[in-house]
Amino acid sequence: MSRLESEAKVTGTAEYIHNLDLPGMLHGKIVRSTRPHAWIKEIDVSAAMQVPGVRRVVVAEDVKAVTSVDYMGPAFLDQPVLAIDKVVFVGEPVACVLGDDVHAAARGANLVVVEYEDLPAVFDEVEACQPGAPVVHDRIRPSSMFPDLKSLPDGRDTNVALAFRLRQGDVAKGLAESDHVFEHTFRTPGSTHATLEPFVCIGEIGEKGLITVHSATQNPSIIQIELARLFGVPENMIRVRTAFLGGGFGAKLYPKLEPLAAACAMLTHRPVRIALSMEEQFFTLTRHATSITLRTGVNSDGTIVARHCDVKWNTGAYADIGPRVAQKTGFTAGGPYEIEHMSIDSQCVYTNLPPAGAMRGFGIPQVAWAYECQTDIIATELGIDPLVFRERNVLRNGRDHASGTKLVGAGTEEVLGVLRSSMQWDEPIDRGVGSVRRGRGVAFALKAAMTPSTSVAVVGLSGDASCTVHCGTVDMGQGSDTAYAQIVAEVLGLEAEDISVVHPDTQFTPYDMGTLSSRSLFHMGKALVRAAGEVREQLLDLATAHTGVSREDLELSEGAVIARGGARLSLAELMERQFGMQAGNIIGRGEFTPSYQPPDLETGQSPDIASFWMVGGAGAEVSVDLETGTLKVEKLVVVGDSGRAINPDVVRGQFTGAATMQLGMTLSEELIYEDGQLTNAGLAFYRVPGLLDLPASFESHLIDFPAEGDAPFGAKGVGESGGFAVAPAIANALYDAAGVRVNDLPLTSERIWQALGAPAPVAGGGVD
Amino acid sequence: MSRLESEAKVTGTAEYIHNLDLPGMLHGKIVRSTRPHAWIKEIDVSAAMQVPGVRRVVVAEDVKAVTSVDYMGPAFLDQPVLAIDKVVFVGEPVACVLGDDVHAAARGANLVVVEYEDLPAVFDEVEACQPGAPVVHDRIRPSSMFPDLKSLPDGRDTNVALAFRLRQGDVAKGLAESDHVFEHTFRTPGSTHATLEPFVCIGEIGEKGLITVHSATQNPSIIQIELARLFGVPENMIRVRTAFLGGGFGAKLYPKLEPLAAACAMLTHRPVRIALSMEEQFFTLTRHATSITLRTGVNSDGTIVARHCDVKWNTGAYADIGPRVAQKTGFTAGGPYEIEHMSIDSQCVYTNLPPAGAMRGFGIPQVAWAYECQTDIIATELGIDPLVFRERNVLRNGRDHASGTKLVGAGTEEVLGVLRSSMQWDEPIDRGVGSVRRGRGVAFALKAAMTPSTSVAVVGLSGDASCTVHCGTVDMGQGSDTAYAQIVAEVLGLEAEDISVVHPDTQFTPYDMGTLSSRSLFHMGKALVRAAGEVREQLLDLATAHTGVSREDLELSEGAVIARGGARLSLAELMERQFGMQAGNIIGRGEFTPSYQPPDLETGQSPDIASFWMVGGAGAEVSVDLETGTLKVEKLVVVGDSGRAINPDVVRGQFTGAATMQLGMTLSEELIYEDGQLTNAGLAFYRVPGLLDLPASFESHLIDFPAEGDAPFGAKGVGESGGFAVAPAIANALYDAAGVRVNDLPLTSERIWQALGAPAPVAGGGVD
């Protein structure tokens, strides 16, 4: 089935917050810090206020006048709405100029003069952990959002915001007893989400002080809760509306522009719109740069015996959800392998860079980069085929993961099997000619979908039996509206095309933990199965009451109740019989909260941390020019365990979409800083993949491994797994082609050329 | 408790559709018929299109291009969106000019030239029933909304749209055997609702063709259903939003501007706003003019033996809900008396006047005008005190009403008792001096709240246990939001001030039959008791699960679960225990559809037509200048059976509000037509009561007669009963003061002066 929203998107009727325009609206332009770490001595707004059309310049003091607390953040309360007293990264919002139009506001913003007193700064996550490094925050306040996130004690002289530890077996003993011990360090750079709809939010104050934000967010419920906390009002005085989202990828999960837009609206009694430029997005949220050291003990037969993982996440100047990345992804930093002795230290580290948080994969692409590069290094050293090595050590379904949670409903072996066949692994490949050599590689990874987490849904039938779905999932391109319509249609015997899935609006749509972690299809899907099921039960009860046919002899199909004998009563007619006219509703509610046990504080283990497991693999065939270092991905295969796909075309789109993003991170994307100043903000300088960068051969394969337990119709989340393993698969193919390894992403021509020994250019530009 | 919305209204943050402004919005101005009955020969829009800023002139042909059927109407499908082929009243919409602003549209509307060919017309409801009268509609199509409304057969040569008959006993025999037979005819003129927020609607076409109307309507659900039928789409493709309403009084129940605004938006792909002037409201919906003849047989001991009622409702050129007025109010046209033999013929009659429909009281003030004037005439003739006469004949609670339905939970005797005491009926009164004489009178009436009818409500708790109420009731000044917050607070042990009652939006709020017939407190109130009850049950279940305290030992109070021993768990904490963090919802649903049996086609009787009974009485003390006919109401007492008042202050406001409206209808309000042309449209010419018109003494008394059955906390609807009996009470006081009767409303000085024998003015303006 085609996506239900396609026509609206093609014809331009699809609603985006970016296009929303309210009468009397002011436009805000943010004045940003030019210093990575400094005291604010003075903010001079006098010149800005002279600009025609500038109405007000809002600074931290103004925000304090309308808020109940000063700091916010999903993990720790460390981030002010506008910088209070000091700035901690270049690009931090310091003031907001409000004007009648964007141009006035921008002119005003250019004229705000901020006087700073510089402080020493630190940018690298490893340096930030050294004794004597400048400390970004000397205090962090716990957040109420995730009760299981425990920071280090206060009175801090460390940049480590959170240190997660996992301990299984005895790693020291395991390493000592191994035939071989390998230690490597891998690094990934900061990168950006580059959503095509930039961050945008309109704040508006309504009746009885209701605070409304129309926001391009992935997470209406969490924004609602956080704004309630910030402004000191109950949740029912906060309304968060969203629409289709032009990409999120984790950037738009937690409060970004919403607190500022709402505060400005309170201060001015007018709606206030703040929309970021693409360049400004680079300073708002990034993906963590990481430094990952793996020490792995292996026996000569190819058995991995022990592994220690040391992961440092550069979370920038504010933690955002970084501590949870460190914690949740720390769980699986050892890879999709069965390893008897495992220890993990996963640290979330503050630096004076823009904040880093969630991004598609939630850290898995970074840790997979490390463990899947090392997997090939080890296999090569041991003389074992890398795929065979993986098959030997793979964590099989039903076995306990190092996190303490059993792997269930996860097709790890099956993903490897499809990689083998789709890469034609048993066939020789063309090795290239002259200076252009070809090679291939594979990689795979797994991820546990996060808990604790709740989704609530409401499904309603109107008097004509037309169906409306209320839920908080944001359709940001992943096709959730279509999938949900299919799910509800299946339960109620309706056509998916006839079902209306309404955009989230927290004044009406129930709670959802957020459109994140590939959880929507699984969690909200399950809530919808239950909500539609409640409707179904009521309809069958009514049909029995009105027809006398017994419950077991009735089925819902084609918009009607159908009796075993073939007699049929349309649902609209049933409603009319029940309510005496075209009237009434049948309403069903569904809620889903998977079971969860918080990790043991000592071992970091828990028997129940995953609502479901995602497994994703990639295979790459590349060509490398040995003279220039130019790498080209000729073929890319993505293999994901989707469970039973509700809509296979949409799943394939998710797999290739995630893989394409990861292709950019592999080959070109990198935030480049000089003394904390980002030098390549904006898509003119930061290169995301274009159509011409896509591999000539680009396959995606769905694995219908039987999902267990709560999966709605056996389906699982698929939004991230396509990207897990792309980078190491390409790096492994590079090695296979050229015999060199590059352990720091991205795999630029220059880095490969350096790894190749920096061969001199061919004189005269001759052809081989 | 004060009304929860007062502050928003006083500070100006209260939302009204009239204030809504959408970007890119066009403004529509309606071109109206200047003829009462005529063929449309040609519509020339060329001059209008030359006006700068005029974008389009929409006529019936354009509407047909986007609609699926041509006619609409709640009772019969008789009314086009814009006149098709012919016009049937002066003021009927013929075209709509769309401009960039209201001024351009209005200039354009003045330049649209319509060529007519006149047809004979009829204006009086009695004349319209004569053989040979011009026929307004030669065909009317049944509507699906009310399956129990049966019109006369098609191929029509009558203006009678619906003829309701009630037959109990043998009236001919009863009249023949009575000691006295009285026959009088009473008339009431057409009048207008004069809502201070004029009709206004913005149509907008959204994503996937969703048709949204932001409308000042009392009835979002019915508008949704009717627009779905008109445009041939399912209900889930229609969204009707409203806000606070600046008065409704029955005018804004059924589609008015909504179909036109939506059609114009479809035709132009832009939002289209149509807002009527106060003058235009006079041509949109009116209150029925009536001619009522009562033939009543009475024995000399004061027992009413038999009564025949002949009621003709002038429903104008389109039926709107007029047939239901004729049918539903026909039921009780015999008054609040126990009369053995009763026959009622209640006819809804088309004429070439603006349509008439529902208005506060739904016809009861008109029939009460007739029967309560006649009651006093009879009592006077028999030499019985009018109050004693009423007490002798009153239909007592528990007795069968002539409609066949038993009177339950109705304090008829109690209303009379409070009238006796509050009017100090047993004390003599000051009779005045000289030409200014004083007198007093009483009257009372009852009404059956209409069925069939359904209300659905949803009550939700957020993760912080703040509570939101979703329902379709429109708060148009009656204070329903406050009452609902009180009801839900009572069930859940919360503070009413903390509960958010959200404005209706059919994309989210469930079905409600409409804010009409004083039904909202009773019907939606009951649905809310049930919805909040579902929340309560879930909370208590959770509390038991999380604390181990047994269900019976737990209570909800002060935002917490409180155990018998005094231990307390706040609801927010309970939510957090259940969902592992501040998350989730508890959702309760409630639905209420009172039982109903359609009337027998032969006798018009039904054992079950009333969901509840309303009883309202009035007492008036007036002074009359015998030389000029000037009548002044010195004291007005309103007595209503409110059941247990949820908010006594609001009930008193409803009683005095309804009485004040009725005071205007009694003394001054009258639509005056000349050959079908309304001569006094607009509040400059049509006089509604001002503050100075209010009686110096104005009391309202609530009677807490124990309501039975489904009444939420024993409460009943109170929006109409304050106005039932005001007019006859004043007329009876006029008779008591001056010895003259005026049987046609309003009681203008001129009519009273005529009744007084048209005394010559005192020469030289002397003082008596």
Image (cartoon, coloured by chain):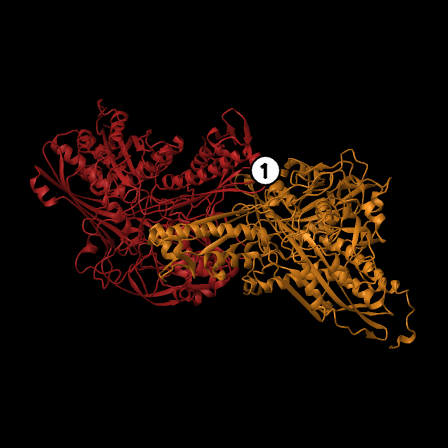
Chain colours: A red, B orange
Q: Position of residue A248 (x, y in %)?
A: 38, 45
Task: Please identify the residue farthest to the top as the structure is shown.
Answer: A427
In the image, residue A411 above or below residue A62: above
A82 and B511: which is toward the camera: B511
- Residue B23: in sight, yes or no? yes
Question: Residue A413's spot in the image, x, y percent?
Answer: 24, 30
Which one is in front, A262 or A317? Answer: A262
Residue tagged 1? A576
Name the spot of residue A683 as percent of width and height, x first.
37, 45
| B542 sits to left or right of B764 | left
In this image, B505 relative to A108: left or right? right
Q: Front-most of A332 and B351?
A: B351
Amino acid tagged 1 = Glu
- Looking at the rendered structure, the secondary structure element under dot 1 is helix
**Total marks in image:** 1
Quarter occupied by the C terminus of chain B: bottom right
Q: Residues within 10 Å of mark 1 (few under 14, many from 20)?
A: some
Most extreme residue toward the bottom, as rendered? B767
| Residue A272 seen in the figure | no
Left or right of B652 on screen, residue A717: left
Residue A733: x %, y % from top left: 22, 32
Left or right of A516? Residue A53 is right
Q: Chain of mark 1?
A: A
Instruction: Give the quadrant of the N terminus of chain B.
Output: bottom right
Residue B434's image quarter?
Answer: bottom right
